[in-house]
């Protein structure tokens, strides 16, 4: 055997010697920039020589030439043309740069397979590293919302924004906000971990699966769209190289004065008014039940003659110039600084290839909190036998989040907001106490000085409260690939994901929380001046730990034969998956952080509370939780292409789960799709030169949406242990509803891909979806005893829209200018709904609504009849007549009495990006827009103003005297406050505003230093960049100066700069 | 190769179809299938023992709230305090007494329906009976408290034609709601309690769970509200035969050492602990001045219940010693007073006064109490009724007493004076049946109480 090889080797060597003497050849390899994949099928032409050559499947070429060198030109679809000198005997590597504005990537990933784009029938949007990195940030998700075709970010004002991912793909597919979350797939498997674990530097591409043909392979979880994240991978025959990225982001302090708050002087006037109404008497009579504002204290001293009228007035007036926002700005806020570093090393040898990458993020938040994240990744591919490939891929993340100083609005009293004239420090910067829980004077004397200091100091307290969360996540995939024949392969994959998250809230003995609790549970013996502490004098620790373990096993057969003009690509597989979560919560008293000890306390006895006198248990959080979701799925898809012109695709999937109460037959949910594509431009009859590429495609299919918390049988939930009986206590969690089935989305997608004049490429897609069996709340008469509503399949909804994406090369000389326009429309409408709320006030305002003929995010409001010219009270209509009978307006109006304002979700949205490149400098920037929707602006509400001290700056615009109704719609301040009048005002049409706006999202300036030469010889590449992120709103339809996307503070502008270096 | 493929498919199928999918999705969830699951529903004490209607206290004649305080707490409590004919309870009634009490009724129905379905263990007979008894007690008590608020005074002559409550006796929430007659309402309450008495144990694990004496005390109260004093006497007797502890306010067991509240929690008089829903105006309220002045200075209740009239301090005589709310459960002092009253009404003056004095000697400073005497049964009855008012202040029974006593012509008119604005509630006013929340009327189409 050995000898045979030796003979062959010599024979080969001899032959090549002969060849070299008789012919001259240039050799080399064509690879693509960035990922450095070999480029098969690149065309090479040689100057002065006829004919063209193409590279082989490994991107290699070998061309005989006359002479010893030649000027060659290399072209490849999707890449920029390159012309260079090649010398015989020196193999060259030709790196091809991607064509500017190229949006059609060659291959898209569904998480199950890699699909050549020209054979895909479904709707995919792919975001590549380059586009992703035009913005800088710690997480990856936030930036996707602004650059992806078919995706719109949520406004904080809309219902359901706290759920999901902060954006919708092609509008909503459910009315249950909890399940509006798109499915996230990381390297072929659903990712259960915290999404912010993923380091943006590790990402190769993100693919959005938007229609049924693309997503139905993901079955019952795909109705809200699928986001497939693919990390950078080791690749066969890659060169060994090292890449390093580093950047720093500096963000401005948030503008607290953007918040529309009642002015300090107005607030003082309100407090004085309430004092005159004897509102604060109660605070002084029962000082343990809450603090009165400082102004009330001054007024009381004046009333009691402790200070003179004049003295009191001047004390009050001195407060008028203060604003607590300055205190926050000065003492708590700073510019935030985020640092990011990433290193990756990859290489290959013979049968194996590998990649090792690490990332480190270090953030200092605007309130001096911390967020640190470490990522480590390892990817190894081995092909020990020609037919067998093995792969191990691990991704480990560790993050730590630590609280800092208080955010604006987090320092409150037990009755509500602190007065805007509150000071945290005196003139010399010494911390001032804030009476946040008990009235001034009360705790000063209680306990005769035997207790712990009972004052709260905002400037000190945060130093003694440490809220820390650590998350560790390990995601491992073991893969085996066996090629039976060239066209038949078996893939087995096992994924193991484990996430552990631990939150510790440690409040040491100096913290107000600990001192207050210890004091309240103190038993004082006044005769011998001793104190018995029921709660040990020490720190208090609340710990929550949550574990997650997900395992998937997937087996998949792929069959990809092609013969003559036919080709087939098919997969068939099955997957078993299980996700277990496990949580545990407890409280430790007398906790000592340094020696890790705690003092046992008696949680089973009741003790008198020193303040209220009532008997109470020592507070504790204590719980265990465990969930287990299991799925078994079968899936398959196939696409058949004839002559590269016609493609037909089908896919199907069935899922079964262990969800409670489903009958076995209902556990299985079949979902399927079909699609077709026609590459018209490849037809013989096609002759349009100005439209060199034209392709039509159409798909239809079903996707599911399931909420594992909804079950068809009655379930009880244990809430804890009843301390009195020692037995568990609980409640009914879900009520029986045997008819309950999963939500289902059926989607049509019609698309055209084209290339116009070789300058404009793009796609236009139109989709329609029909969502049936919508989960919704069916009203139940409270007399039934199960609350006001139960979950039922309530109706159906349709949605439709356009996804248009255009790329144009405007100038292509030394200066290259490309434009990228995304224009999306989306609308939805409830077709059928089982019931309509009887009362209009259940519909007015903002909510997720089921009213046939209107969008799910419809905005209805009470018609407005102006302010009463005599009282300034808001007026509406009762049966067509102007009225101030709010109980009637709210409770007796019907839906037809309301005015439909519009939808809360944008009808038109998208972004416009421009990119300029001149030599090594590039400049790109993007605007994001949303049009055609409405929002409800905030205004003054007098009930929270009186009770909680929270007010809006509209207070200054309120009706104060007859005639004011000509200029203002803000109702007068009438005391006692009728909350029904407030509800009517809030739900009336005068607070509706147009939400249309354009936002300048980012600006990126890049400089690509010419590496590999001179002083930069050691570098393979060297790129510098600077980015301005979240630049802000540039146009808005509302005149009130409100950013419609934010309810509170607007995300401040931030600036990043960094470098990307390759060795 | 075909072999490998078929093996592979087989393995997968096997895994998929076996028990893999039978795993519980959430460990804390269960479908009710054993006794402890059902008991669990009644051990949620902050609901089951903490949601009695506060309207029974707010609308009666025990407390005074200033206009300023009512303005500060909001219009709803003011409407409750001034007997608004149209709106007493907020429309979102699941947060108010209608929805709350019906949710307790739902729990009781659910438990009763599942009791025959669940898995039984040998020897769990007593526990099974206990659970069933508690469920019946819960249902009866919920209906009784609702009847106090939403129906007129029971009168045997007209009860079959008077509007009662919608009686829901099944957990099925698809059943329509319709109002039954007052007779049917009381019949149901009585039947449930009689059955519960047979099932419940003499002593509960804690007084947060019902027991035989609790059911008897409640049934005695039910009969008293119906003015069926014969039956009231029977069940008061039965109750006291099992539990007749009284604490001595002069000190000893049950009396708190220092602190805001006068009593320790779970003291021997308590038969069943339950609290009224908190109301903001409880903080602002003072005891009615006439009532306060009716306590003798040697009567310990004057200082143990109230911290004087000024400055305002909440009621200290709360038998649950819990801040922010009032005890509205059952205790032996009430049962003694019920028995005394029934005896007086039967003309057994001496026996009635024995019970009264037995109680009061433990309420006055040691050595100061001179036993009450009465020349006639009528005189004894008046005495007992006054002491009943004083003993059971803020316990949620006064509203029921106002209804039944006015029925026998005692002509108690309630008057509120809010800075000169006078509100009156005449004896036997239709507003003694408070307005059912509007959304319930709208949703179910049931008749509103006549105004």
Image (cartoon, coloured by chain):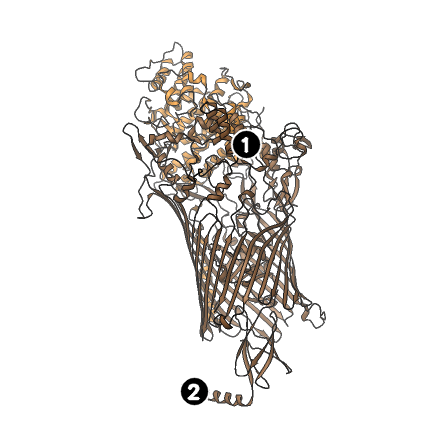
Chain colours: A brown, B orange
**Quarter of the figure with residue B297:** top left
Towards the viewer: A692 or B346: A692
Question: In the rendered picture of this protein, how many numbered marks are placed on residues?
Answer: 2
Residues at marks 2 and 1, CA–CA distance in whole angstroms? 96 Å
For mark 1, does the 10 Å Cα neighbourhood hold few (<14), some (14 to 19), or many (20 or more) residues?
Answer: some
**Quarter of the figure with residue A587:** top left
Left or right: residue A703 compared with residue A413: right
Quadrant including the N terminus of chain A: bottom left
Discs 2 and 1 share one subunit: no
Name the disc covering residue A6, or none.
2
What kind of element bears circle 1?
A: loop
Name the disc covering residue B57, or none.
none
* Subunit under mark 2: A
The image position of residue B191, as x and y in percent, is 45, 29
**Quarter of the figure with residue B381:** top left
Residue picked out by circle 1:
B90
The image position of residue A103, as x and y in percent, is 61, 64
């Amino acid at each position: 055997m050995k000898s045979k090889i030796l003979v062959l080797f010599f024979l080969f060597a001899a032959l090549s010697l002969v060849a070299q003497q008789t012919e001259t050849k240039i050799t080399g390899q064509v690879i693509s920039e960035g990922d450095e994949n070999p480029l098969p099928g690149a065309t090479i032409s040689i100057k002065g020589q006829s004919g063209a050559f193409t590279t082989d499947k490994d991107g290699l070429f070998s061309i005989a030439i006359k002479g010893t060198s030649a000027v060659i030109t290399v072209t490849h679809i999707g890449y920029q043309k390159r012309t260079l000198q090649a010398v015989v005997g020196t193999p060259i590597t030709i790196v091809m740069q991607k064509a500017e504005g190229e949006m059609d990537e060659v291959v898209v990933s569904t998480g199950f397979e890699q699909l050549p784009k020209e054979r895909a029938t479904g709707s995919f949007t792919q975001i590549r590293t380059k586009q992703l990195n035009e913005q800088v940030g710690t997480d990856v998700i936030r930036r996707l919302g602004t650059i992806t075709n078919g995706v719109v970010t949520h406004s904080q004002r809309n219902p359901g924004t706290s759920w999901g991912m902060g954006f919708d793909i092609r509008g909503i597919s459910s009315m249950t906000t909890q399940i509006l979350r798109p499915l996230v797939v990381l390297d072929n498997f659903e990712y259960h971990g915290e999404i912010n674990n993923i380091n943006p530097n590790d990402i190769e591409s993100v693919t959005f699966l938007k229609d049924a043909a693309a997503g139905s392979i993901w079955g019952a979880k795909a109705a809200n769209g699928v986001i497939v994240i693919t990390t950078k991978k080791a690749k066969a025959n890659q060169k060994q190289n090292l890449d390093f990225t580093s950047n720093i982001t500096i963000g401005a302090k948030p503008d607290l004065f953007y918040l529309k708050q009642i002015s300090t002087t107005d607030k003082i006037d309100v407090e004085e008014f309430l004092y005159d109404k004897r509102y604060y008497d109660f605070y002084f009579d029962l000082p343990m039940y809450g603090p009165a504002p400082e102004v009330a204290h001054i007024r009381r001293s004046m009333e009691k003659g402790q200070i003179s009228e004049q003295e009191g007035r001047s004390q009050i007036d001195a407060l008028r110039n203060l604003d607590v926002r300055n205190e926050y700005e000065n003492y708590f806020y700073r510019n935030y600084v985020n640092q990011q570093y990433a290193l990756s090393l990859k290489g290959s040898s013979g049968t194996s290839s590998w990649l090792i990458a690490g990332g480190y993020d270090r953030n200092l938040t605007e309130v001096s909190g911390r967020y640190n994240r470490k990522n480590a990744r390892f990817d190894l591919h081995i092909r020990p036998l020609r037919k067998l490939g093995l792969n191990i891929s691990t991704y480990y993340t560790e993050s730590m989040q630590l609280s800092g100083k208080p955010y604006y609005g987090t320092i409150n009293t037990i009755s509500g907001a602190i007065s805007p004239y509150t000071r945290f420090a005196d003139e010399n910067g010494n911390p001032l106490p804030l009476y946040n829980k008990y009235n001034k004077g009360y705790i000063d004397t209680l306990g005769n000085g035997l207790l712990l200091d009972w004052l709260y100091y905002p400037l000190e307290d945060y130093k003694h409260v440490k809220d820390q969360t650590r998350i560790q996540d390990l995601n491992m995939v073991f893969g085996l690939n066996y090629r039976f024949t060239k066209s038949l392969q078996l893939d087995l994959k096992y994924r193991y994901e484990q996430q552990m998250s631990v939150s510790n809230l440690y409040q040491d003995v100096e913290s107000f929380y600990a001192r207050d609790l210890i004091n309240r549970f103190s038993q004082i013996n006044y005769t011998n001046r001793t104190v018995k502490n029921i709660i040990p004098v020490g720190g208090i620790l609340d710990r929550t730990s949550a574990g997650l373990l997900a395992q998937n096993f997937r087996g998949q057969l792929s069959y990809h034969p092609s013969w003559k003009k036919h080709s087939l690509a098919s997969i068939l597989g099955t997957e078993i998956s299980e996700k277990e979560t496990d949580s545990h919560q407890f409280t430790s008293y007398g906790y000592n952080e340094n020696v890790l000890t705690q003092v046992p306390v008696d949680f089973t006895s009741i003790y008198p509370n020193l303040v209220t006198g009532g008997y109470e248990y020592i507070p504790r959080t204590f719980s265990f939780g465990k969930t287990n979701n299991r799925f078994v799925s079968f899936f398959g898809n196939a696409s058949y292409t004839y002559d590269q012109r016609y493609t037909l695709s089908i896919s199907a999937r069935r899922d079964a789960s262990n969800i409670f109460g489903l009958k076995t037959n209902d556990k299985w949910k079949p979902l399927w799709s079909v699609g077709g594509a026609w590459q018209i431009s490849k037809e013989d009859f096609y002759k349009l030169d100005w439209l060199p590429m034209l392709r039509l495609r159409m798909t239809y299919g079903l996707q599911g949406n399931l909420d594992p918390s909804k079950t068809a049988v009655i379930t009880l939930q244990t809430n804890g242990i009843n301390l009195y009986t020692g037995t568990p206590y609980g409640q009914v969690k879900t009520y029986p509803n045997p008819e309950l089935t999963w939500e289902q989305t059926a989607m049509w997608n019609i698309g055209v891909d084209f290339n116009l004049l070789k300058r404009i490429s793009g796609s236009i897609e139109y989709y329609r979806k029909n969502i049936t069996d919508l989960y919704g709340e069916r009203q139940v008469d409270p007399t039934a005893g199960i609350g006001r509503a139960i979950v039922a399949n309530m109706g159906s909804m349709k949605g439709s829209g356009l996804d248009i994406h255009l790329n144009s090369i405007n100038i292509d000389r030394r200066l290259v200018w490309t434009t990228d326009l995304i224009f999306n429309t989306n609308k939805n409408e409830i077709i059928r709904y089982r019931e309509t709320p009887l009362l209009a006030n259940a519909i007015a305002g903002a909510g997720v609504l089921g009213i046939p003929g209107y969008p799910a995010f419809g905005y209805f409001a009470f018609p407005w009849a102006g302010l009463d010219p005599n009282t300034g009270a808001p007026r509406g209509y009762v049966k067509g007549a102007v009225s101030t009978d709010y109980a009637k307006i709210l409770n007796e109006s019907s839906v037809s009495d309301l005015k439909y304002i519009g939808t809360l979700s944008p009808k038109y949205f998208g972004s416009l990006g421009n990119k300029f490149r001149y030599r090594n400098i590039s400049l790109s920037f993007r605007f994001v827009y949303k049009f055609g929707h409405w929002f409800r602006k905030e205004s003054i509400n007098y009930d929270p103003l009186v009770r909680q001290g929270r007010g809006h700056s509209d207070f200054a615009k309120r009706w104060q005297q007859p005639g004011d109704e000509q200029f203002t719609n803000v109702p007068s301040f009438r005391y006692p406050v009728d909350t029904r009048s407030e509800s009517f005002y809030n739900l009336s049409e005068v607070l509706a505003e147009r939400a249309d706006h354009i936002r300048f999202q980012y600006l990126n300036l890049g400089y690509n230093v010419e590496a590999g030469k001179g002083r930069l010889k050691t570098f393979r590449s060297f790129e510098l960049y600077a980015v301005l992120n979240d630049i802000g709103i540039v146009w808005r339809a509302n005149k009130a100066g409100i950013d419609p996307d934010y309810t509170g503070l607007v995300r401040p502008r931030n600036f990043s700069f960094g470098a990307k270096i390759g060795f | 190769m075909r072999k490998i493929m078929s093996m592979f498919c087989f393995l997968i199928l096997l895994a998929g179809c076996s028990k893999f999918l039978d795993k519980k999705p959430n460990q804390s969830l269960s479908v009710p299938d054993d006794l402890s699951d059902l008991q669990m529903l009644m051990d949620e004490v902050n609901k089951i023992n903490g949601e009695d209607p506060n309207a029974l206290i707010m609308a009666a004649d025990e407390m005074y709230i200033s206009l300023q305080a009512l303005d500060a707490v909001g219009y709803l409590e003011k409407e409750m305090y001034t007997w608004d004919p149209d709106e007493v309870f907020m429309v979102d009634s699941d947060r108010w007494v209608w929805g709350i009490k019906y949710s307790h009724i739902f729990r009781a129905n659910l438990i009763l329906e599942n009791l025959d379905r669940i898995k039984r263990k040998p020897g769990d007979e007593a526990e099974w009976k206990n659970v069933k008894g508690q469920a019946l007690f819960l249902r009866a008590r919920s209906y009784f408290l609702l009847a106090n608020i939403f129906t007129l005074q029971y009168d045997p002559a007209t009860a079959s034609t008077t509007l009662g409550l919608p009686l829901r006796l099944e957990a099925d929430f698809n059943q329509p709601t319709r109002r039954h007659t007052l007779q049917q309402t009381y019949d149901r309450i009585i039947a449930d309690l009689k059955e519960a008495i047979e099932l419940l144990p003499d002593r509960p694990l804690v007084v947060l769970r019902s027991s035989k004496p609790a059911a008897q005390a409640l049934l005695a109260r039910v009969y008293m509200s119906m003015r069926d004093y014969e039956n009231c006497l029977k069940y008061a007797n039965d109750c006291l035969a099992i539990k007749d502890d009284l604490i001595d306010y002069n000190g000893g067991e049950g009396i708190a050492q220092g602190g805001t509240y006068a009593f320790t929690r779970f003291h021997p008089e308590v038969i069943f602990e339950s609290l009224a829903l908190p109301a903001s105006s409880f903080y602002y309220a003072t005891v009615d001045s006439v009532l306060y002045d009716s306590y003798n200075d040697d009567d310990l209740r004057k200082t143990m219940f109230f911290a004087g009239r000024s400055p305002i301090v909440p009621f200290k005589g709360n038998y649950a010693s819990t801040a922010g709310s009032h005890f509205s459960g059952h205790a032996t002092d009430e049962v003694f007073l019920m028995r005394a009253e029934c005896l007086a009404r039967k003309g057994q003056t001496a026996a009635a006064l024995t019970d009264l004095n037995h109680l009061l000697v433990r309420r006055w400073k040691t050595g100061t109490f001179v036993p009450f005497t009465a020349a006639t049964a009528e005189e004894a009855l008046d005495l007992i009724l006054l002491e009943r008012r004083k003993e059971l202040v803020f316990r949620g029974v006064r509203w029921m007493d106002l209804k039944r006593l006015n029925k026998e012509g005692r002509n108690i008119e309630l008057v509120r004076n809010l800075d000169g604005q006078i509100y009156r509630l005449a004896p036997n006013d239709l507003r003694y049946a408070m307005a059912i929340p509007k959304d319930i009327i709208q949703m179910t189409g049931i008749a509103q109480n006549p105004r």
